[in-house]
Image (cartoon, grey):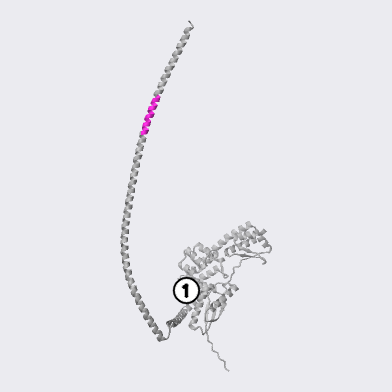
Amino acid sequence: MDNLIPILSGMVGLAVGIIIMMLISKAGLNKAKEQAKQVIEEASEKAENITREAALDARMQVYEMKLAAEKEIKEKKQEAQKLESKLTRREDTLNFRDEVLTNKEKQFEEKNKKLTEKFSVLEKMEEELSKKQAEQMSELERIASMSFDDARRELMESVEKKIQNEITAYVKEQDEEARSRASDNARNIISLAIQRYAQEETQERTVSVVALPSEEMKGRIIGREGRNIKAIEQATGVDLIIDDTPETITVSCFDPIRREIAKQALENLIRDGRIHPGRIEEVVKKVTEELEETVRKTGEETIFNLGLGKMDREIIRLVGRLKYRYSYGQNALQHSVEVATLSGIMAAELGLNQNLAKRAGLLHDIGKAIDFEAEGSHVELGAKIAKKHGENATVINAIESHHGDVETKSIISVLVGAADTLSAARPGARFESMENYINRLEKLEEIANSFEGIDKTYAIQAGREIRVMAIPDKLDDLACYRVAREIKEKIENEMTYPGQIKVTVIRETRAQETAK
């Protein structure tokens, strides 16, 4: 009994604990259900809010799209109305043009009809006129005992001969009158200019030869397997000619600047004694820079000595390059200075702009500074250079006309041409090979002999004059003047020559009898 009570008490406590736990669990479950219900209610409320907002946004987008569509439809309608109006106006214009063209077509048909009628009338009149002319020509041929073609031929020959004689006589008269007026003044001015310009007459040739101290130096310049000579040729762009000529190397190149660089570089290498590809490149570079500086200083000194004003730096450099350019053995820079001085003196005598004349004379051959590296004659290149650097129009015309390629437009251009001829034609100024000299003389005689009525031709005074012997029975005195002018024109068109060539046609009749 005593043990039963504790057991019962424990069981009761256990039952009470279980009941309490069940009550607590039921209370927690209820609370969880309430919380879940509250979450569900909140979620439902949020979902309704989102649904309402989405519906509102959808309505707004639909409304905006409706407005945009209405606006686009309105714009399309306006464009369609404008296009319809434009098409309507164009249709009205086309209808109006169609009416105008219809009216003009009717007028043209009426005029064409009238012209057809007039043309038929004119054809009838022409037929009648042709018949009358044929009758008159037959009557004239019967009276004159000569056909129409024979009469026309005789008349044309008579008129042609008369006009030719009159023209020749007029040309001769005007030529003699012009010569008589201009000869004295021109002779005085030119002689004065030559006297005042006392330039030493020297002759230079474009022969680039480098002297060697010994034959052993040729081998050093050639180098092992030819590497030194190849380096020199590649660095300078020239050809070195090493032949059997003792202690001499010839430098060959069409470009005088490159030829001069190679010559100076070789001389420096020979003096220095160190000859190898690296040293060759170094010396060539140094010589190139020094030569460019020499060219610039030469140009500036030339401009200063002539007393010319400001000149473009590029033109000054080109003037300096003329120092290494030659024409028929005559130095181009020396020739240009001579022409500038003579032009200035003659311009001063005539009361013209002396500085402008000297400027034109100096630049008349400026194209020769680049004619070996650019396409075109030195006249064309010189004119382009002068135009590019803004030279005076008179200077440009003097450059273009000093060889007769373009007509002279000023007296200064004429003076430059005369000075150019004086500088080139004076004794010792230019060198010409014997072969070219003989070919030129033969060509002169060939041109003169090609004319009818010429017996013989002789080139004299080193090709400065040709004497043409005319056949008296075939050429009269007036015809001789005509032939001389034609020979002169043919020489100018077919030949290139320095200075001037005088053409003299001689006609003489010799009567000979022998007394017995």
Q: Quadrant of residue 278?
A: bottom right
Q: Position of residue 282 (x, y in %)?
A: 61, 57
User: Which residues, given as a range, are shown in magenta?
Assistant: 35-51
The residue located at (38%, 31%) in the rendering is: 47
The residue located at (41%, 19%) in the rendering is: 27
Q: Quadrant of residue 173?
A: bottom left
Q: Tell me if residue 46 comes above or below residue 121 in the rendering.
A: above
Q: Where is mark 1, residue-wise?
A: 349
Tell me if 415 is positioned left or right of 128 in this view.
right
* Observer-nearest of 219 and 334: 219
Q: Quadrant of the C terminus?
A: bottom right
Q: Position of residue 318 (x, y in %)?
A: 53, 64
Q: Residues within 10 Å of mark 1 (few under 14, many from 20)?
A: some
Residue 195 appears in the picture as rendered? no
Q: For the stretch drawn in magenta, what is the main secondary structure?
A: helix
Q: Tell me if residue 5 comes above or below residue 411 in the rendering.
A: above
In the image, farthest residue toward the right: 216
* Observer-nearest of 417 and 304: 417
The residue located at (43%, 17%) in the rendering is: 22
Q: Position of residue 290 (x, y in %)?
A: 57, 60
Q: Tell me if residue 94 comes above or below residue 331 in the rendering.
A: above
In the image, farthest residue toward the top: 1
* Amino acid marked by disc 1: Glu
In the image, farthest residue toward the bottom: 516
* Observer-nearest of 39 and 265: 39
Residue 346 appears in the picture as rendered? yes
Q: Tell me if residue 444 comes above or below residue 82 in the rendering.
A: below
How many numbered markers are drawn?
1
Q: Is residue 49 magenta?
A: yes
Disc 1 on helix, strand or loop? helix
* Observer-nearest of 167 and 273: 167
